[in-house]
Image (tube, rainbow, N blue to C red):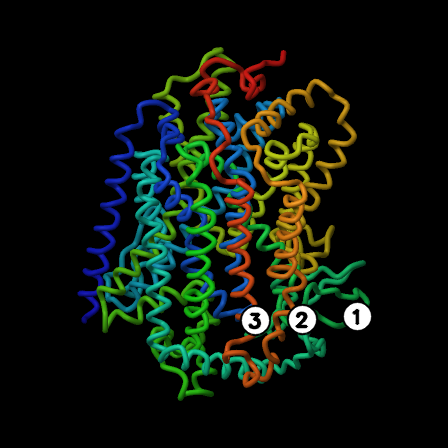
Amino acid sequence: MDNNSIIWLLGIFIFAYWSVCLLAGFFGSQDNKTARDYFIAGRSLSAPMFIMAATATSFSGWTFISHPGLIYAEGFPAAYASFYAITIPLAGVFFLKRQWMLGQRCGFVTPGEMFAAYYQSPTIRYFVVVVAILFSLLYIAVQIRASGFLLHILTQSTGLPNTIVPFIDKPFIENGQLTIESGMIILSIFMMIYVVMGGLRGVALADTIQAVLLAVGIFFLGWLVLDYVGGWTKLLEGIKALSHFESERNKIILQGNGLSENYDKYTMITNWIQWVPDKAATPQVDKLMATIANWIQWINPQSNKVIAGSHWTGMFILTFMIALMGIQSSPDFSMWAFATKDPKAFAFQQVWASAFIMGFLLFFFTAIQGIGGHLLGADIAFREAYPELTKNLLGVFLNDDQLSSMVFSTEPLVPLLIRMMADSAPWLTAGLAVCALAALQSTAAPYMSTVGSMISRDLINVMYKNRKHENLSDNRQIFWARVSTIVITLFSLWIAIHATDVIVYLGGLAVAFGLQMAPALIGICWFPFFTRKGIIAGLFVGLLAVFLTEGIVTGEGKFLESWVNWGQWPYTIHSAGWGITFNLLTVFVVSFLFKKNKEQRAHRDTYHTFFKQNTSSQTSTRKKWGVVAFVIIWALFAIGPFATIGNSLFGKINEPDTWLFSIPPIWIWQILWWVIGVYMIYMLAYKMQFSTSPRYEIEPLRDDVNDEHPSTKITPQGREYD
């Protein structure tokens, strides 16, 4: 099929998909009679709608676009990231049901209202909004950037006429294809329309469709890559050859579970302790196709040695997976909990939709996409070394260059895999392109909606109420939510266009920021010992620690180089790990120092008494502690320091003939612990009743917390404190 026909087919499919999303926004708007309807769908989201929407929100465009590219670039160690199919819902297991109960009982509409009421602090309400803005701005920017890249690759060599956009002084179409910036602008405008129109209900309707497209797209793209490679046997033969080739190309000597340290090509920043940034200290060898480097990288500051292998150590994997728990710990996800009609939806989403279905797709089909890129011509050196195992289907789009030599080298793989089918199955190319767009929008749109609502409700309405002693009308709250959504989206677009030097940091920074709300949620849901001062101090320290360990302002050539010598992810520990560690330490210390206020403790205890009255189960204390131990053991072995055992448990790393079932040992280890992880989530959600319906029906004290009382005086028992 000629290029013009491909463009027309892409246009028709994308237009049809966007039309459906616009209809979702329109139908969602029909039921938005009050601000509560617009912000949280009137607490009426059905179980199927929540299951689909929460799954689509949790697994973003990074899942569809970037994760396969990361596996291509880093090998099977990067496939450990697939465990976020377990760790993302793990946060939801601990927090969503109890937030839903408080929303139903007290009438909370935003998480800021809930935090302010529990901790009796208007200040923390503003902190929540700040975290929501930081999280949403960065996360939306990453999705927008990826969408631009997708459309840029898909329109490659299509002969579109060159066009200039005057107001940003950048080309709209250049060299016959959409520029990255033009793709970002198109998607941003479209999303703003249906999000602003429909509110969270409209977003949920669209997400229901997008979740299906996300899963179907991952499955079919992985299946097609496997077919193009030549089937399962050919894939395993290619993996064996790739493992040997990488070992020879990078001159790595594998020693047990670790690696030789006989390199001197890392860039080091030395001080009293050696901090290991991911790029500055990444060696010439930046991937190990069949092993993780170690459980942690300890570096002597007096030594000239560098880290062995890549930054994918046991500690990095553990803290990175903990970072992604920030998605369902973020303020934005609290509003999904408030919007849900029936808490039964939580368990099904966590166990079956996320842990089982998405986990299955990620551990098999996403891994196949990433490794398959080498076997389909993206790696010119490997293609030339093993012509009998490779097909040059991607190299033609790269002009026989290396995929790794491209800017944002992990991003183009999936768009190229979609593009390679344009001649033989153009309708499939168009369909998969729509699936990719759906994955990107399914995450960006909810955050656009929820953060706009929080700004309207927790900032603008509060300021108005402080002056006029009354709330803004529903129409004016909705108006300001729409204005805030537009402003946030435009700012995210600006970041995506102009912050190209730091765009690689933004996704990790966003989830790390979101994770810093976890101690506040732990306090509300489980631990009344945490005090208002402790939470505020911990949140501030945690955000600061994240910012200082993400490598944006620290490290060689950065703003704070003269004061601190570390870069990104010191000791190969993700910035979220550093942030939550200092956050929790600060919370414990400050809470201990200021624990004597009996009135505040009595107020917090009313919430936990409410939980005990409505969530008691027949599970014994001994079994509860057994489950806690199970979770810790799972984390240590599946995604933590002991994951290095999986390097060689099922065969010798550098001897493929010893691999069990001819599968890399590290892949078997990942699949084994994924299955155990699904069972763990099932035990927590169903058997421990963390995500089932409450013991009794929750009777609301009010529909909206703003209708009657100052939010800092609300308790689930209906009592107030002066």
Q: Which mark is nearer the camera, 1 or 3?
A: 3
**Lower sequence index among marks 2 and 1:** 2
Ranked by sequence position, the earlier of labels 1 and 3 is 1
Task: Report whether residue 568 is seen.
Answer: no
Residue 94 is at least partly visible in this image:
yes
Q: State which tag comes first along the sequence, 2 or 3.
A: 2
Q: Which residue is mark 2?
A: 266
10 Å crowding of disc 3: few (<14), some (14-19), many (20+): many
Residue 491 at x, y = what percent? 44, 41
Q: Position of residue 421 (x, y in %)?
A: 28, 70
Q: Quadrant of the C terminus?
A: top right
484 vs 81, nearest the viewer? 81
Q: Badge 1: how crowded within 10 Å, few (<14), some, or many (20+)?
A: few
Q: In the rendered image, which residue does mark 1 sit on?
A: 303
In three-dimensional space, the C-alpha distance between marks 1 and 3, rounded to whole angstroms, equals 31 Å
Check disc 3 and report the residue beneath it.
Answer: 666
**Secondary structure of the residue carrying numbered label 2:** loop
Image quarter of the N terminus: bottom left
Q: Residue flagged by tag 2: what amino acid is it? A: Tyr
Residue 197 percent coordinates (x, y): 30, 34
Q: Which of 625 and 372 lies nearest the eye of the viewer?
A: 625
Identify the element where label 1 is drawn: loop
Residue type at tag 1: Ser
How packed mark 2 is, by other alpha carbons closer than 10 Å (few <14, some 14-19, many 20 or more), is: some
Q: Secondary structure at mark 3?
A: helix
